[in-house]
Image: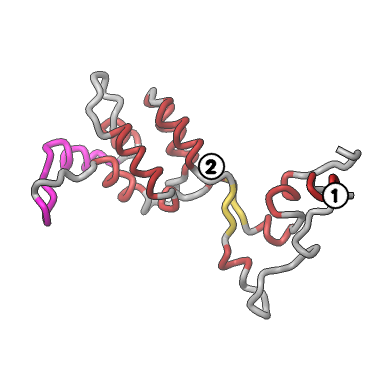
């Protein structure tokens, strides 16, 4: 619109290169930072046994966590409340998130390899598109994040329309 070109960083970080440099794309976000509701939905998708084995068990094996399969496949009761059955997928994600390579992108790839496109597509929708490391950005001398160009992208659609 209006003959202006807009970059990806301009849209995501309002034209502030300092903020954009402290961010990561959604596929590089650690699994440990997935929203709780997204984790719960993944558990509902992967916990029920699948006739072809395309459930949490095969995912655990593909992620190199075969010891969890033996631990949770027998349905061990919850230590505090025996009537509660622990989610094997939740335990799998918790254990795997301790590894450095446990990113949303790797999990999506493993789910697709497993044939669980439904879970991979949901994860794509539920995961953040871009995440900024606020601690790194807020590390300015005065304690405030950088202002760059006043927080406005000069080429954003809203600023072009307002001209």
Q: Residue 61 at what x, y percent from top left? A: 29, 34
Q: Residue furthest bottom?
A: 142
The correct choice, above or below, for 11 with respect to 66 in the image is below
How many numbered markers are drawn? 2
* Quarter occupied by residue 56: top left
Query: In this orientation, which residue lies closer to the viewer: 160 or 149?
Result: 160
Classed neighbour count for the residue bearing mark 2: other residues with Cα under 10 Å, few (<14), some (14–19), many (≥20): some
Name the element at disc 1.
Answer: helix
* Residue 51 position within the rendered picture, expressed as x and y whole percent measured from the top left: 23, 19
Q: Seen in the image, is 156 located left or right of residue 128?
A: right
Q: Residue at x 11, y 53 (%)?
A: 81
The residue that label 2 is drawn on is 27
Q: Secondary structure at mark 2?
A: helix
Residue depicted at 47% across the width and 30% down the height: 121
Is residue 101 found inside the magenta-colored segment of the image?
no
Q: Is residue 37 left or right of residue 132?
A: left
Any mark on residue 162, and which?
1
Q: Picture quarter containing residue 55? A: top left
Q: Residue at x 44, y 31 (%)?
A: 120
The first of marks 2 and 1 along the sequence is 2
Tell me which corner region of the image, top left, top right, bottom left or bottom right, holds residue 149: bottom right
Residue found farthest to the left: 82
Q: Which residues are magenta?
A: 65-81
Q: Residue furthest front?
A: 162
Quote the CA–CA distance across marks 2 and 1: 34 Å
Q: Is residue 8 left or right of residue 115?
A: right
Q: Nearer the viewer, mark 2 or mark 1?
A: 1
* Residue 46, position as x, y percentages in the image: 30, 33
Q: Residue furthest toward the top? A: 52
């Amino acid at each position: 619109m209006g003959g202006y070109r807009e970059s990806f960083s301009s849209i995501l970080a309002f034209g502030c290169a300092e903020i954009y440099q402290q961010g990561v794309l959604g596929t590089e976000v650690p699994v440990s930072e997935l929203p709780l509701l997204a984790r719960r939905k993944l558990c509902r998708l992967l916990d029920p046994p699948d006739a072809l084995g395309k459930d949490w068990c095969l995912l655990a094996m593909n992620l190199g966590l075969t010891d969890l399969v033996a631990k949770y496949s027998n349905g061990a009761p919850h230590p505090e409340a025996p009537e509660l059955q622990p989610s094997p997928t939740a335990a799998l994600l918790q254990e795997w998130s301790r590894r450095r390579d446990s990113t949303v992108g790797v999990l999506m790839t493993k789910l697709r390899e497993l044939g669980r496109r439904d879970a991979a597509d949901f994860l794509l929708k539920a995961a953040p598109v871009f995440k900024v490391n606020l601690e790194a950005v807020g590390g300015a001398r005065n304690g405030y994040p950088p202002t760059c160009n006043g927080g406005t992208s000069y080429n954003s659609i809203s600023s072009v329309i307002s001209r």
